[in-house]
Image: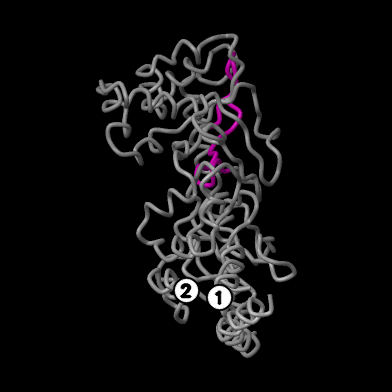
Amino acid sequence: MKQHFLRFTMGLLLLSTVFSACKKDNNTSAPVIQDEEQTLRSEAQQAISAQTNTVQTSGSAIADILTANDARGQQRNIVQIASGVPIFKALVAAVVKTNLAGVLASQELNATVFAPTDAAFAKLPAPFNNAANINAITNPAQIAALKSILLYHVLGTEVRRHQIARGRSSAVTLKPAGTANDNTIYFSNNFGLLLVNGNSLVLFADIDASNGIIHVIDDVLLPPSQTIAGIAIANPAFSSLVAALVKTNLAGVFTGAGDFTVFAPTDAAFAKLPAPFNNAANINAISNAGQIAALANILKYHVAGSRYFAWDLGILQPLTTLADAPNNKLITILGLDGGSVKGNGNRSFARIRPANILATNGVIQVVDQVLLP
């Protein structure tokens, strides 16, 4: 017992050079940190303003299109409304290709459809990127995948914009469940803007149909197919993170069911640390029990016990992690396709990019620094 305690203490002392250096820099550079906070706060407020303008501008244009095509009003079903509006050509082609037209036209449906525009479909790879290519699909596997994607956009009840709770919430779609949470969509309803799965912005809400409600979105929703661990293992940029998770016996936490947010440092982020924490090979070679225990707590400091998309992070909002209390808080700043996060022991904020990588058991936010308690 005494020998183990000594090894643990030695490990903490070896890591203390990282923490003490960061603390010293934080103490001597407080004005710099305050300047950075002000800059990031300003960026966040600009993002809110820019996206609000996007919704207002797009919403006005969509309203004009609906009026010009006489598509508003409860006398038409979901398919009839979509078919009569030129911005939904790819969506209608997909509905027809997957034989879902009858389902979505049914008067007994009473559904909510998050409807991607043609511009949203254009972001996908061929053959899913436009109506012509979708019409030409003959591969049964592609058609089946497209059907699952479409059903992932449909809720089995009518949900109006104002009925979606502020902050974070979720809803189960009509997509048949494959693995846990692969048929659930997640809402980020903050600052007057509604995003689905962190990336898809609701441009226009509450188009009434005779059998449901349509909300217009700017990104196609893609159901997750991998766990957090699976995504990290498949990405060579996370070799140090994977090595650290394996070394600390934490990898199994992210292979099964769950709801986590992982702020995932890249190999370039780990490379900024002193040896032996600076790369996968050195981490694999660690045998000191104290170093392993300290590394485990650092990894837990990168994990929250529920899903936070970038738009959920607030402005200088504290976020509780799985690390040992009381040193278990991160400070976060929201963004639409990114954001920022800072550990207590870091000199500056880490940038989140890319953001909102959806997994069956959570969401990954990629960061360019290792976060230090």
Q: Give the residue type that dot 1 points to.
A: Gln
In the image, is residue 368 part of the stretch drawn in magenta? no
Mark on residue 280? Answer: none
Rendered-image quadrant of the C terminus:
bottom right
- Toward the right, the furthest residue is 326
Front residue of 4/365: it is 4
Q: Label 1 belongs to which residue?
A: 291
Residue extent of the magenta highlight: 195-215
x, y (%) of residue 362?
56, 47
Name the residue: 38% across, 27% down: 146
In the image, is residue 200 part of the stretch drawn in magenta? yes
Q: Is residue 98 above or below residue 5?
A: above
Q: Disc 2 or 1, which lies upstream in sequence? A: 2
Count all numbered tags in the image, as a single digit: 2
Front residue of 66/266: it is 266
Name the residue: 32% across, 34% down: 129
x, y (%) of residue 37?
61, 73
Q: Label 2 belongs to which residue?
A: 286
Name the residue: 43% across, 48% down: 230
- Image quarter of residue 101: top left
Magenta stretch prevailing secondary structure: strand
Query: Badges 2 and 1: C-beta atoms under 8 Å apart?
Result: yes
Q: CA distance from mark 2 to mark 1?
A: 7 Å
